[in-house]
Image (tube, coloured by chain):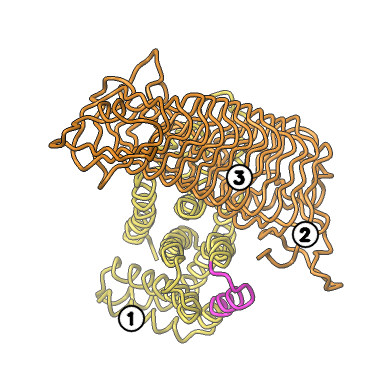
Chain colours: A yellow, B orange
């Protein structure tokens, strides 16, 4: 039953104008970056900035929008003998899978056409797409949580945008401030810890491991060295990203079971 | 009198190299056949050609030095030397040349060594196509691959030096030419200059060393077309310049180093047509540097292009290509119309609290970097490239 709802949501979204726009945006971005720059490495760096900022934003907004828009349909489904978890999981997966697909295909097609498979940048690029997909799943799940907890549409939108703003910008500002204020203390464990608690920072770290490893290893400190210098950083970051995906989904299911509609 | 040839082999009349040297007269050839010779402290005190056939092994059994040359016109060719004794009071070397001229050491392979080839007050010699593979782990109990001490006019070419303390070390040595060497995985430096002047090194590769090349307290050094790669770590540099005057650094490639070039107390240096690719910091300028000129360099995809302590002084950045440059070129003369600022606010912050490096490439950092770019407060506001190139230098 969940699969059926997933399929329905997925195809519903795939037909919607917004998915097309989203897909075409990435397609255009990929082509413009590659054919104006003629340089895969530079394109990967620019893409990283886009993915880290834009993907969470779109995931959040789309998730909230979809939930509120399909509310009547959801209520209709709720009247049927269908498990609540299947309804919400199905809808959630429908949204996130279609968004993820837009991202992967939209960027993948131009890069593949450009001859990515023969380039050294293929691993950087694949990592970029994987983190992008993770961010889509994480932020859609977070936005479903927000929407489930807020009946009021405007409030829900507000919270969703605030969440994005907080994780994308404000968090790093506070993070930087605390690093400077407590500069006299050993901060390497704290700084790695603080990174882990924000999925955007986490994805950024994952990409830094590929792009800026020489700078990261310039810092004196055993903790940094084991984290960035070995495979540990990659493993921990990926593990935490998975956790970041599962926790909001679990809360979403949990919340939906108790909610009065 | 014609030069004769003495053949040394385990089953010959002459069984040891030492014996051979004693029997030889000036300008003889000693041909060493394949085999293992357990010998040390072989003293060559007359002009000889010591020629190995199929790399005969001379095993010093950790007793001390293996070959010591005190005469002029000695050629050592095609030997395989192992087990030089480690000592904390004496610098034992596989081959030591003392105060001689016109010597040639070529095609020699050294393994399990303390010091490799040690030239002491030698002149006009050549060290060519040798391979030195050490097993150094710590600085204090390891020696240097090729060491020159008070030498003049020596050519060091085509050598491979791995896993020793300093790959090639020069102290008080002038007019040395170092070319086509490959120095990697050394504990300290790939190449190290101390108090040496008028030397040239070109077309060498320095990879994965504690630091690539350290040039200290030296004058008029030319550094041309070398590759410095993957020197990673908090105190690792592709090239470290300390108290260097009047040098020329041209056509080098600095790739994936934690710091490409770090300079301190260095004056009147021209950096021309170098490529800085994917380094953590391409150039780190510490204090007391005057009249350094950076022109026609490519700065591409470095995490930070330039980090700067103190005042700009009269150092100059002009006509370089910066991959981060976002300006435009309306008059189409190949030079950007807007100056480029190579020092970011973030690099200033990282200098103060190094942990902030984890915030590299975050949106927040980009925003404050942008505001700093528009109105510089913390970074020196006259540090800019007024004519950044629009196309990268080939």
**Residue identifier under label 2:** B388
Cα distance in 3D space between marks 3 and 1 = 50 Å
State the residue in front, B187 or A14: B187
Q: Say if labels 1 and 2 share a chain.
A: no
Q: Position of residue B354 (x, y in %)?
A: 57, 35
Residue A166 seen from this side: no
Spatial CA distance of label 2 from label 3 is 19 Å
* Side of B183 relative to B302 (left or right): left
x and y percentages locating residue B267 in the rendered image: 76, 35
Q: Which residue is mark 1?
A: A7
Seen at 68% across and 41% down, the residue is B307
- Quadrant placement of the C terminus of chain B: bottom right
Q: Between B32 and A184, which is closer to the camera in this rendering? A: B32
Picture residue at 68% right of the left edge, 63% below the top:
B393
Left or right: B178 as drawn, with respect to B393 = left
Q: Which residues are magenta?
A: A25-40
């Amino acid at each position: 039953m969940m699969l059926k709802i997933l399929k329905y949501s997925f195809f519903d979204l795939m037909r919607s104008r917004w998915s097309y726009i989203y897909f075409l945006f990435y397609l255009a971005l990929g082509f413009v970056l590659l054919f104006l720059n003629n340089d895969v490495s530079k394109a990967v760096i620019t893409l990283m900035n886009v993915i880290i900022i834009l993907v969470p934003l779109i995931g959040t907004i789309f998730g909230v929008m979809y939930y509120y828009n399909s509310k009547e349909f959801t209520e209709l489904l709720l009247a049927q003998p269908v498990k609540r978890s299947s309804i919400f999981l199905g809808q959630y997966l429908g949204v996130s899978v279609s968004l993820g697909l837009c991202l992967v295909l939209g960027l993948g097609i131009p890069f593949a056409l450009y001859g990515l498979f023969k380039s050294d940048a293929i691993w950087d690029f694949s990592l970029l797409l994987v983190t992008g997909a993770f961010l889509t799943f994480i932020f859609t799940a977070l936005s479903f949580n927000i929407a489930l907890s807020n009946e009021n549409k405007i409030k829900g939108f507000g919270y969703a945008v605030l969440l994005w703003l907080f994780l994308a910008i404000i968090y790093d500002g506070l993070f930087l401030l605390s690093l400077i204020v407590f500069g006299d203390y050993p901060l390497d464990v704290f700084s790695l810890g603080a990174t882990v608690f924000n999925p955007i920072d986490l994805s950024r770290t994952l990409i830094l491991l590929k792009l800026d490893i020489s700078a990261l290893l310039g810092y004196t400190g055993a903790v940094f060295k084991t984290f960035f210098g070995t495979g540990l950083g990659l493993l921990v970051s990926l593990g935490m990203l998975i956790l970041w995906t599962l926790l909001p989904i679990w809360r979403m299911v949990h919340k939906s079971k108790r909610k009065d509609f | 009198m014609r030069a004769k040839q003495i053949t040394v082999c385990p089953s010959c009349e002459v069984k040891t190299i030492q014996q051979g040297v004693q029997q030889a007269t000036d300008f003889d050839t000693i041909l060493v056949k394949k085999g293992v010779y357990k010998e040390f402290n072989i003293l060559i005190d007359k002009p000889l050609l010591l020629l190995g056939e199929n790399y005969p092994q001379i095993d010093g059994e950790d007793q001390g030095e293996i070959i010591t040359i005190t005469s002029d016109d000695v050629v050592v060719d095609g030997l395989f030397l192992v087990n030089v004794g480690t000592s904390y009071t004496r610098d034992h070397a596989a081959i030591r040349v003392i105060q001689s001229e016109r010597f040639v050491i070529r095609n020699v392979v050294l393994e399990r060594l303390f010091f490799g080839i040690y030239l002491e007050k030698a002149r006009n010699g050549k060290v060519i196509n040798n391979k030195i593979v050490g097993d150094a782990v710590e600085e204090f109990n390891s020696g240097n691959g090729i060491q020159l001490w008070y030498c003049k006019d020596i050519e060091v070419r085509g050598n491979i030096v791995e896993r020793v303390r300093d790959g090639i070390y020069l102290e008080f040595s002038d007019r040395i030419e170092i070319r086509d060497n490959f120095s990697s995985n050394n504990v300290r430096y790939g190449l190290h200059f101390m108090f040496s002047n008028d030397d040239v090194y070109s077309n060498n590769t320095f990879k994965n060393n504690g630091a690539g090349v350290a040039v200290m307290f030296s004058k008029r050094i030319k550094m041309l077309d070398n590759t410095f790669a993957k020197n990673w770590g908090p105190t690792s540099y592709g090239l470290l310049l300390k108290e260097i005057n009047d040098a020329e650094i041209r056509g080098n490639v600095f790739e994936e180093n934690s710091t490409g070039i770090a300079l301190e107390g260095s004056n009147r240096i021209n950096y021309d047509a170098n490529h800085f690719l994917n380094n953590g910091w391409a150039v780190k300028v510490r204090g007391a540097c005057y009249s350094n000129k950076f022109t026609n360099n490519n700065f591409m995809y470095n995490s930070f292009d330039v980090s700067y302590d103190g005042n700009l002084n009269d150092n100059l950045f002009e006509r370089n290509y910066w991959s981060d440059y976002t300006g435009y070129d309306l008059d189409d003369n190949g030079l950007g119309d807007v100056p480029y600022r190579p020092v970011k606010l973030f690099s200033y912050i990282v200098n103060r609290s190094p942990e902030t490096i984890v915030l590299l490439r975050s949106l927040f950092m980009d925003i404050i970097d942008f505001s700093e770019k528009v109105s510089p407060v913390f970074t020196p506001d006259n540090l800019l490239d007024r004519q950044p190139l629009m196309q990268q230098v080939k």
